[in-house]
Image (tube, coloured by chain):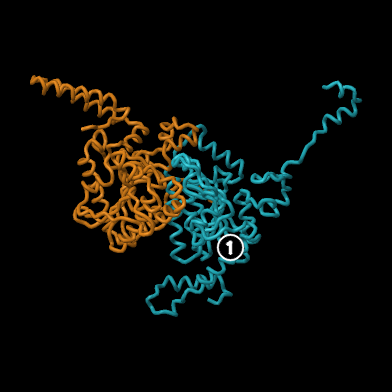
Chain colours: A cyan, B orange
Amino acid sequence: MSWFKKLVPSTIRTEASNKKVTVPEGLWSKCPNCNAILYNSELEKNYSVCPKCEHHMRISARTRLAMFLDEEGREEIGKNIKPTDPLKFKDSKKYKDRISQAQKQTKEHDALVVMKGQLEGQTIVAAAFDFSFMGGSMGSVVGERFVRGVNKSLELGAPFIVFTASGGARMQESLYSLFQMAKTSAALTKLSERGIPYISFMTDPTMGGVSASLAMLGDINVAEPNALIGFAGPRVIEQTVREKLPEGFQRSEFLREHGAIDMIIDRREMRNKISSILALLMAGFLNKPKATDISQTIDDEYALEAENTAELYPDDGV
Amino acid sequence: MDLKFLDFEQPIAELEAKIEELRNVEFDNDINISDAIKQLEDKSLQLTESIFSNLSDWQISQLSRHPGRPYTLDYVEHIFTDFHQLHGDRAYADDPAIVCGLARLDGQPVMVIGHQKGRDTKEKIYRNFGMPRPEGYRKALRIMKMAERFHLPVICLIDTPGAYPGIGAEERGQSEAIARNLFEMARLKTPIICTIIGEGGSGGALAIGVGDRLIMLEYSTYSVISPEGCASILWKSADKSQLAAEAMGITSDRIRELGLLDEVVREPLGGGHRNFKSITLNLKEALLRHLADLKQLSIDDVLDRRYQRLLSFGAFTEEMTK
C-alpha cells in the first residue's frame, strides 16, 4: 500500500480500493477492420456490419439463420446427427477433446445448422456454417446434415440456400471428410434435375474443400463484401509461386471480376434480394408445363410434380 | 537397372551394390564365384521380403511418390491399345498434368483419364509435377461428357500431390472446376472406374475420382491433405509428417478397413517400379473384372448405386428423439 493511501481514513480507503473501474462485458465490440469501438446493440441492429467501415463481421450459424429467416415456422433439420471419431485421431490433442471443446464454446454439436423456414412467406430450407466450430470444417456431420437439408427441399419443392464459412475439410476425419465433397455435390444434382433453385451465399472465409464442392455449385453464387474465397490458402500460394499476391486477391470483388460469382450482396439486404431472386426462379419452377398440356411423351414424374406443387402453393393456381 | 532406393531400403541397396561388384569381378577376372553371388541374391530377396512385410504408413507414402513408379502413360502403354490422346479444354488451354484419350481395354473401347507426372526435370516442370490447373479438370470433364455421348466407360488413373495452388489457377476458378467435376461425375451416364496408382492428393485427386468403383494399388495413398501439410497445421511442424501419415490412415489397407474402397491391387515385391509388367498386369485384370461387373447392370442401376454409394460416405451417430 502506498504512503498516500495509508493517510486516507479507512472508511474511504476500503471503498476506494474495492471500486475498480469495470465495464460490463459484452457491451462494446471493436471492429477488426477499422478498430472503431462499437456499441453492441447498435451493431446487432446493423446485422453485425460495422457502421463506420461496412466491414461484415463473422457471425454464428444460428445468428445468421435468425437474421435471414422469418420468425415464424422455423424447424431445425438433422439436429440429432452428431460427430464420432472414426479414426481415433490424435495430434497434439485428441479429436474427441477438440469436438467437446468446440461444442462447449459454440453450444452447437457440429459446424452446420440446417432449418426449414420461411423467407418473406416463401417456404425455404436454409443451412449455415459455423466458423467458430473448428473453423467451420466439413466432416461427416456437416455432409449428412447438408444432404438432409437437400432432401427436405426435394420433399417440399422448396428452394435451398447455404451460407458458407469454412476453412475446408476436417483433417481429423481424413478420407471421410474428403468424401463429403462428393456426397454433398451428388445430392445437389437432384435439386438441379428437379429444377429447384439452389443458392450458395459465401461468407468470410470459404476455402478448400467447401469452396471446391457445394459452395461453387449454386444456380446463383453470391458473396458478402470482401469475403476471402478460394481453393488454396493465400499463404500456401505465396510459398508455392514465390511472388507477392495481387491486391484484393481471393476477395469477393476479385471473384466477381473473374466471373466466379454472380453478385455481391450486403448482409443488410440479403433478405430482400434473395427473396426477390427466389420469387423469380420459383415462378419458373411453378409454371413448368403441365402433363396435360403436352403430348404423352412427358413422363409421370412431371404430372406428380405439378400436383405436389399445386398443393404447396394453392394460391398460385398451378 | 537404377532402382533409386529409398532411405529405408538402404540395407537392400548395400547388398545389391556388393552383388554388382562381385559380378564385375567375375566378369573381369574370369573366375567362378556364382555360388557366392547366388547366396547374396537370396539374402537380398529375404531382406526385401522382411522390410516390405512390415512397412510403416510413412514408408508407403514415400513409395507412392517413388520417382521410378509407373505413371498414367506407362499404364496406357502396358494395359491399353489404340490409344489416341485428346487435348485441350476448348476454352483456355491444354493442361499436360492431365492426359485423356480414347483407347481399347482388351478390345473394348474406353476413355482413359489420368494425372501425369514427369520423369526428368524438364518433363516434371512441363507436367507441373502432376498438379492440374482448372483447364486440366475442364478438359477431363469435356472428355467425360464425350464418353457419355458415345457410351464409353471411363477409366480414371489418379496420381497427384493435389490441385495446383497458383495465382492463375485461382483466377480461372480452381474451386469451381473441381466442384463441377464432382457434380457431373455423380450423374455421368456411363460407368466410371477410378484407381489410385500413386498419390491421391485431396480435392485434386477426387476431381477425377468419383465413380462406381474405387481401386487402390497396394503402395498408393489417398488422403484429405498431404502428411506434410497436416503436420504443419496440426503439429505446427513439418517434421511430424510420419505421425500425421499414421494418424490419417492414408494407406490402401487402412482405407479398405474403413470400407471406403472396393479393392486393393497387389504390387510386386519391392513395389510397382521394380516390375512394370507385373503391376500393370494385376491392374488390367482388376479393371476387366470390374468393368464386366458393371456392364451387367442397366445404366439406371449403375447410377442408382453410384448415388447410394456417394450418399453413404460418413461416420456419425444419430439419436432418435422421443
Q: Position of residue A45 (x, y in %)?
A: 70, 54
Dot 1: within a 10 Å radius of its alpha carbon, few (fewer than 14), some, or many (20 or more) residues? Answer: many
- Tell me the amino acid under the disc marked 1: Ile
Compared to residue A317, the image places residue A118 above or below, namely above
In the rendered image, residue B290, in percent from the top left (x then y), is placed at 27, 51
Choose between A18 and B158: the one closer to the eye.
B158
Say if residue B243 shows up in the picture: yes
Residue, disc 1: A274
Residue A113 in sight here:
no
Left or right of B272, for residue B322: right
The N terminus of chain B, quarter of image: top left
Q: Chain of mark 1?
A: A
Q: Is residue A283 left or right of residue B105?
A: right
For residue A26, side relative to residue B304 (left or right): right
Residue B308 location, quadrant: bottom left
Which secondary structure lies at badge 1? helix
- Which residue shows up at 41% across the image and 39% down it? B226
Q: Residue B322 at what x, y percent from top left?
A: 57, 52
Report the residue at 27% width, 59% height from top: B152
Q: Which residue lies most toward the right here? A: A9
In percent of width and height, residue A196 lies at 49, 65
Residue located 57% across and 56% down the image: A115
Res B254 quadrant in image = top left
The one nearer the camera, B92 or B132, is B92
